Image (cartoon, helix red, strand yellow):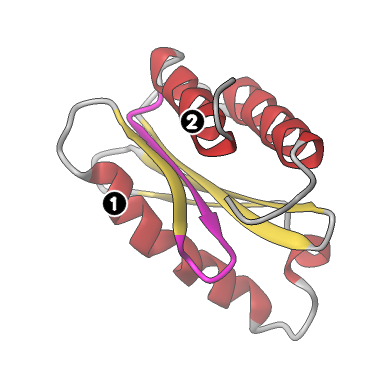
Amino acid sequence: MPTRSEVLQSILNETIQEGLTATVLTTEEGLPLAVSDGDGKAKGEILAAIAPVFQQAAERSGKPLVRLAEEMAMRSPSGALVVCRFLTVGDKNFILAGLVPKGRTYRRTMNRAVRQIRKVWQETGGQAP
């Protein structure tokens, strides 16, 4: 039986197969739980560093993050999109960040990944990975 970490990694690998360039799942503190990088150029690690910045920007309003925003995005000069989805499972907050190539859709892929992450986390009792 695969571990939760292996299942999370598999979920992120599927996002790459569906057209995203890189994805990362982090804790709200920015600790990477799983990283998938389609071209091997460390873009996943860069996303892991960027994701908490999105969270900090959202939290400056003084409201809880998941009630304030479900998603934040930023477009690069090349047209690629950095998307951060904020999700809560039980009492844990996570950030799913993805790098989306110019002209590519991402919502269906990100929504599926969020559903699967929630399911895996709930099925494993919400304990640390």
Q: Secondary structure at mark 2?
A: helix
Q: Return the residue at label 1.
A: 45
Q: State the mark number for residue 32.
A: none
Residue 44 sits in which quadrant?
top left
Q: Determine crowd level at label 1: few under 14, some 14-19, many 20+ residues with C-alpha closer than 10 A.
A: some
Q: From which residue to which does the magenta span run?
A: 20-31
Percent coordinates x, y for residue 71 in the rendering? 65, 50
Q: Return the residue at label 2.
A: 6
Give, as a three-letter code, the residue at label 2.
Glu
Q: Disc 1 and disc 2: Cα gap in Å?
A: 18 Å
Q: Determine crowd level at label 2: few under 14, some 14-19, many 20+ residues with C-alpha closer than 10 A.
A: few
Q: How many numbered callouts?
A: 2
- Residue extending farthest to the front is 1
Percent coordinates x, y for residue 91 in the rendering? 81, 63
Query: Does the segment drawn in magenta span residue 106?
Result: no
Which residue appears at 79% of the width and 45% of the height? 125
